[in-house]
Image (spheres, helix red, strand yellow):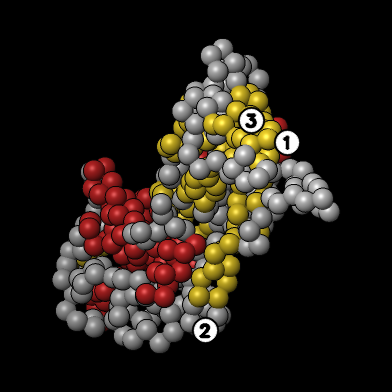
Amino acid sequence: WDLDEDSLFDDVPQTLWVEGVNTSSNAADVEISFRYEYPAGTILCADTCMVTIIKVEITDATDNFAPPLGEKATINVKLEPLPPSGGSFPGTFTLEVVRVLKDGSRQHVDWLDVDPSTSESQYQRSLDFSSLSLTWDGKSDTGATLAEGADKFTGLSDSFYRLLPAIGAGEKVPPPYYTFVAKAILPGGSECEDTEDIYVPQVVDILYCPEAALAMIEDLVFEGITIIPEITDLADFITIQNKIADMVETMYVGVNIKLGSSALAPHSVIEMLKGDDGDPRGRADHTDFGNADAGKSARVYVTRLRNDIIMAYIFGPTPFTVPVTLDERGHAHGLVASHELGHLLGLVMDNSVLDGSEGRHNKTPGANSRLLMNPGNADDVIDDLGRNGSWNVKSLNKDYLDFILPVP
């Protein structure tokens, strides 16, 4: 700054903010010098101060975990340089869990206990450590309201911002992801921080009611011909169950969904029920566009598949090979479970983003196109059993699923 008789010190700022680029190797190893030179190059007076450039870094964190299944996340934090022996740097350390909103602000979700060695939770501590390994149980302390995230999905002719579901106080958090904010708060209000995203899958529990299990093991015989063999070995029933789960995972590959049994909210449930002759293959609670509610349910009625199989055997459309195998039965039930799960996740909403039909299915899919969210009359039971080839997800639907439930 140039000083003259008129301005004196008016042009000199009272407070200087200095950005540290390289972290200190030791405490107080960076010198800041102030000099008054007149003429230029001739130092008339000077003063110096020694400062420490500190850095808070998240070195490692769990990238994906399911709180409703009892899973916990770990996060490792490093502070550089080493604090003075037996002491600490001035300031405090906190670790907050937040969600980043559409306007760039942060919505609080939880504070982590940053000093697990104490009997009571400590949400701030001195800068007296070199590294920390912390744990998050996936609960929110005060809860959070339904909000819109910072990123946007563009569909057919419209777009929408990511929906961040509401969280109840003390409840496990729903999908899709959160941000760890490790922060050193220094004297005077300056801060340094590091952030890391952590992802949460949509947990789905497939439940089998006893009546459905009994219906699934019964044989189906027509005019002395065994269409569906009776299941007498538990291992065979488990084979069907595994195939159902495999179909769901196949249809949602690359989508952050995790199958598991949980009594903790939030999670969605697919119930395998016996059903009556007039029931459809399946039914969902509702079509939840954006997955704003992670705790929904749908039903698969297993009797309907038996009815459809016997009708296909009698009336075609093509010669029907018997008996139906365990793998084929699991394939068909798994398709219905995947289809109803699609409705729970918002497919195929009849809006300008997804362009679904009035019945919330793919529009004009074409006969036997084998797309997951086709209406029930678009494909026949031969397709459902997997005899005509593999099934796929319409590209726009897949892009939408990838957006609402991203994987790390």
Viewer-side label of 1, 2: 1
Q: Which residue carries the number 2 mark?
A: 157
Name the foreground residue: 289 vs 241.
289
Name the foreground residue: 123 vs 69.
123
The answer to whether marks 2 and 3 mark residues whose Cβ atoms lie closer than 8 Å is: no
Say what secondary structure mark 1 lies in: helix
**Label ID, residue 188:** 1
Task: State the CA–CA distance, disc 1 to disc 2.
Answer: 49 Å
Q: Is residue 365 above or below residue 112?
A: below
Q: Amino acid at mark 1?
A: Gly
Q: Which residue carries the number 3 mark?
A: 48
Name the residue located 54 percent from the left edge and 24 percent from the top edge.
27
Q: Label 3: how many residues lie within 10 Å, few (<14), some (14-19) or many (20+)?
A: few
* Relative image position of residue 15 (x, y in whole percent): 74, 43
Task: State the CA–CA distance, disc 3 to disc 1.
Answer: 19 Å
> Quick check: 178 left or right of 39?
left
Q: Amino acid at mark 3?
A: Thr
Name the foreground residue: 167 vs 44.
44
- Disc with the residue nearer the chain's start (2 vs 3): 3
- Disc with the residue nearer the chain's start (3 vs 1): 3
> Quick check: 243 left or right of 151?
left
Name the foreground residue: 68 vs 189.
189
Say what secondary structure mark 3 lies in: strand
> Quick check: 73 left or right of 118?
left
- Disc with the residue nearer the chain's start (1 vs 2): 2
Residue 219 sits in quarter: bottom left
